[in-house]
Image (cartoon, grey):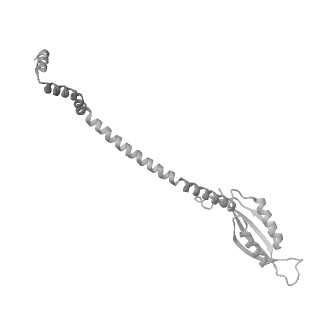
Amino acid sequence: MELEDLIDKYRNSKRQVRYGLVGLLALLPALNTWFNQGESLEARRTQAEVDVATERQKFEAAKQKVAELPALMARLSEIEEELKRAKQILPDRIEMDGILASLGNLEKELDVKIAKFTPGQEYQPNPTLEYKEMPVDLVLQASFPQTMRFLDRLVHMPNLTHVRNIQFGNSVQDMTKKPGEPPLLETSARLILFKGM
């Protein structure tokens, strides 16, 4: 059959048949697309739906984080205040002048003589903790009650301090001592000064 025969049959056919053929021809490109690209388009649509769901979850998570932000900011400012207070107790560096001034004031106030004050090297006793210790060897000369008051005040200084290895020695000869006063003892101790890193 040639093209002219097909055209003649088309013209001689009923109107409904002609409309049906035109409709069928109009559907052919859509059917061709459906059969040739339908699966890939369906896969792309499914992937797009998954992407939309993933992005919606991310959006909801971000929205939740935004809702938590004021509480986190309040917690951050609270931690920063605690850090400031901790730095006052455990400073970044040891102010030896301040320590000596405090010890001098205690020495005068409690009538204790500091015979030896020898700072040692800083060291980190535990590598997992972020602080260092500086030992200071002390030798005191005073009566037992005065020595104990001095050591008590020493560990309650504003800076974090600790006293170890307290040893009471022999009594010291003091020519200015009045009869009935308690004897002067020579006491050695190790003062530990702490510093943050």
The x and y percentages for residue 98 are 77, 61
Work out which residue is located at the far front of the displayed protein and give it: 15
Q: Residue visible at 57% across and 54% down?
A: 73
Q: Which of 13 and 145 is in front in this view?
A: 13
- Quadrant of residue 55 within the rendered picture: top left
Q: Where is residue 76 in the image (x, y as percent from the top left)?
A: 59, 55
Residue drawn at (61%, 56%), measured in percent from left and top? 77
Give above or below for 152 relative to 73.
below
Image point 54% across, 53% down: which residue?
A: 69
Say which of 13 and 121 sits in front: 13
**Rendered view: 63 above or below 98:** above
Q: Answer left or right for 150 relative to 17.
A: right
Vertically, is 68 above or below 172? above
Nearest the camera: 55 or 29? 29
Residue at 14%, 27% in the rendered image: 16
**Image quarter of the N terminus:** top left
Q: Pick the residue in front: 123 or 149.
A: 149
Quarter holding the C terminus?
A: bottom right
Identity of the residue furthest to the bottom in this view: 180
Left or right? Give the position of 114 relative to 88. Answer: right
Q: In this view, does 162 lie to the left or right of 24?
A: right
The picture places residue 101, in percent across and down from the top left corner, at: 80, 63
Question: Does residue 32 lie above or below 78 as drawn?
Answer: above
Image quarter for residue 35?
Answer: top left
Q: Quadrant of residue 48?
A: top left
Residue 151 percent coordinates (x, y): 74, 72
